[in-house]
Image: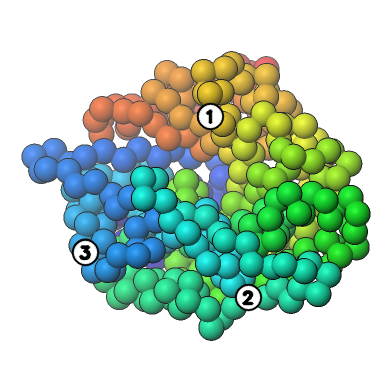
Amino acid sequence: MELAFKRDVAAATDQWRAFWKGENTRPVVSAILPKAGVTAVEKPGYASGAREDYEPIIDQLLAWAETHEFLADAIPFYYLEFAADHFAALLGADLKFSETEPGGWAVPFIKDLEHAEIHFDRDGYWWKRTVEFAEALRARCDGKLLIASNTLVANVDALAAVYGSERLLVSMVENPDVVHSALTQIDQAHQEILEALSVLLDYPRFGSITRHGMYNAGRINVPQCDFSCMISPQMFREFVVPYLAREIRRLDAVEYHLDGPYAIRHLDALCEIEGLDVIQWVPGAGQEQKDWNELFDRIDAFGKGQIRGGGPEHVKNLWLKYRSRKLFCTLQAGSRSEVEDCLAELENISANKPDERDG
């Protein structure tokens, strides 16, 4: 693969390959800096293309890539998603948009879960728009940058989006067999949508990348279950784990999105799922300043990787601290030389101070 906006993409993909094998000698590092001497253009905002014309968005995207440097293992990409419930829209839900916030949410449309027929709606408006935008992006961006698919927010998150959270909670208690039947249909749709995206975005040729910039030469996505904050560990194991496990088996690499303090109680069950590589923690509104080091330590103790970020010293300290080699860091740096110095020091840590890193 060659990318005009990332001339050293071969070196970056080698780093990513070693990362997923646990053979990397430093963290995978993403550093994106404005080019000197030019006016930097901002990347198109989240959910661009849901309602707007495509071409101005692509113009801005290419201008953003042209005016930035993608250093270390950063790979330029565009995230094609219209809403957090984009996956639910591919099941037939309509999307309602905020006039003040980017993106939108699904409008529940299933009234009777017992007789519901949930499937990938290939003839639906939102799949057709996804295809149209992806084709427009690829026509101008192939060989320059990558296209990240929408996040496949499946399992009970998708069911809550198309049926309603309160009604789903009641059904889990009163009619669990019907819930499992619906989740099985959503799981089948997940498989079909993943296959369709693989063709649409040509994963065999380009590989795939997540919304956070994590790359894999095969198939990668970001499984999640934000609904988990409303259910007990027992219900999580019954209604979520089996379907998450199936989603994960279809992927070559996995970055799990763990969102909010009430989701932490499911960490043990999550980390028992084979193939879950990395956990991306989001504290939730009002929780950002809390010290989450105990959670980070637990994740590392389970042998799972993490997505973290900070300046060079912080990144070096993280690499020294954690045993898991699957550490992806967004590096906050002011210059190319600062990035290069940091990478050299990270390599030096592994080469000369393994005792410090391994405890």
Front residue of this view, candidates 168 and 144? 168
The quarter of the displayed image where residue 333 is located: top left
Residue 55: percent from the left, percent from the top? 24, 69
Which corner quadrant holds the C terminus?
top right
Residue 271: percent from the left, percent from the top? 76, 40
Measure the alpha-carbon separation of dots 1 and 2. 33 Å
Amino acid at the residue labelled 1: Ala
- Residue named by callout 1: 285
Determine the residue positioned at 64% across, 57% down: 161
Residue 56: percent from the left, percent from the top? 21, 64
Up/down of 258 relative to 7, above or below:
above
Residue farthest to the bottom, as pictured: 123
Measure the alpha-carbon separation of dots 3 and 1. 33 Å
Front residue of this view, candidates 284 and 255? 284
- The reply to whether the C-beta atoms of the residues labelled 1 and 2 are less than 8 Å apart is no
Which corner quadrant holds the N terminus?
bottom left
Residue 58: percent from the left, percent from the top? 26, 63
Q: Is residue 226 left or right of residue 196?
A: right
Front residue of this view, candidates 160 and 218? 160
Determine the residue positioned at 31% across, 40% down: 32
Disc 3 packing (10 Å; few <14; some 14–19; many ≥20): few
Determine the residue positioned at 90% across, 59% down: 175
SS category of the residue bearing label 1: loop
- Residue named by callout 2: 120
Disc 1 packing (10 Å; few <14; some 14–19; many ≥20): few
Amino acid at the residue labelled 2: Phe
- Residue named by callout 3: 56
